[in-house]
Image (tube, helix red, strand yellow):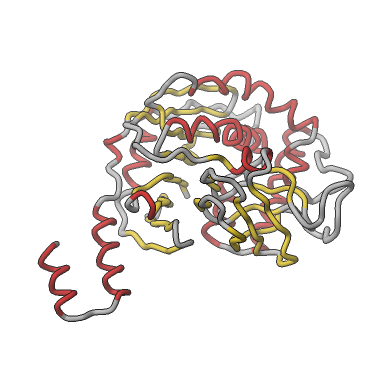
Amino acid sequence: MKTAAGSVFALGVGAVLIAMFAFRGLAAQTHRANEYRVSGPFTHDNLSIFLIHGAPKDSKKLLTLEDAIAQGKVVVYETRNVNELAIENVSAEEVFIQSGEIVKGGAQDRTLKDDIILPTKSGRVNISAFCVEHGRWSARGSESVGTFNSSTEAVATKELKMAVRLKSDQRSVWDQVAAVQSGIASALRSDVRAAAAPTSLPMTMQAPAVQQSIDGYLRDLKSIVDGKKDVIGYAFTINGAVNSADVYSSHELLAQLWPKLLRASAVEAVSKYNPDKKFAPPSPAAVQAVLLDAGSAQPSARQLTDRTSVLVKETPRTILFETRDRAQGDSWIHRSYLTK
């Protein structure tokens, strides 16, 4: 490694190649699934949660987007560009934004495409987004059309997550939003679209009938991470099939995000619920196999901001997005796994 690096400098190769070489070293550090222990399942109806245990990293404390907006520490601005917003951290705390988080308000409700760490006093930063509401392009009720007032929900369904993060296609996102709404309506035998915003995904997720349908999931599963300091992630299955998993660099970050993550998982479970379908949850070993498979592919990398990069590994069965923080020696802070 040192010899190769020395030869790169000796040959005077440019900074871009040096950076590429450094990345190869980082890629070699990508995770081994046996660094995790999987426990569970914890089940309600067709949703089973598995807890992922591991050694928490000594990482910086990060504020979540939901809390940052609620506390007035982050402002998300409407740009009048469907696929781009601007965001500003006006506080002295660093903020973690997770792919798939929804911001509500503006000219249309949006979901944010990538994981990003927003540094303190960031100034305005452009951020990629997709519309999760079709047709509206004006203020809704008393909401501001120039900014977004909350981020209490995240996109539900693996297919929608894929459309946002992998396909990066607005039409696919709209199609999957419609599929989520249709699935929930079919499962609940009720039109769950909001009269004020019938195409809005977050408005559907907050509909009274939907909230009532997920109450049991939340009641039975919300506390399963409490007090378990070595729990740094979770995986979930729906109708007996492994769906996806998220692992974080610390228990604290998982705990802050857990209510939002669980709500999205529960909504997905409701949208795919079939009372006539019988299934058994898979074993922890099946979840471990997904983690191992996702880590087996050759990585590709993309720099998202000066602070944040993402490493992507894809196999025929799974895809892994690993978010890294340059301010912490390019160590990972979030790993997101999706099965195909």
Q: Nearer the viewer, residue 225 or 239?
A: 225
Residue at the far left in the pictured view: 3
Quadrant containing the N terminus is bottom left
The residue depicted at 38 percent of the width and 52 percent of the height is 327
Using residue 71 as the reference point, say whether residue 18 is left or right of it.
left
17 displayed left or right of 181: left
Q: Horizontal and vertical percent for residue 293?
A: 33, 46
Residue 263 visible in this rendered orientation of the protein: yes
Could you tell whether 223 is left or right of 271 in the image? left
Q: Position of residue 82 (x, y in %)?
A: 71, 64
Quarter assignment of residue 170: bottom right
Residue 43 image offset from top left, x and y in percent: 53, 22
Q: Residue at x 44, y 57 (%)?
A: 307
Residue 182, can we see it?
no
**In this figure, what is the number of numbered marks?**
0
Find residue 268 and report its image quarter.
top right
The answer to which of 96 and 215 lies nearer the viewer is 96
Name the residue rendered at 60%, 44% in the picture.
65
Which residue is rendered at x = 77% and y = 55% of the image? 106
- Above or below, 40 against 288 in this view is above
Query: Where's residue 83, x and y in %?
Result: 66, 64
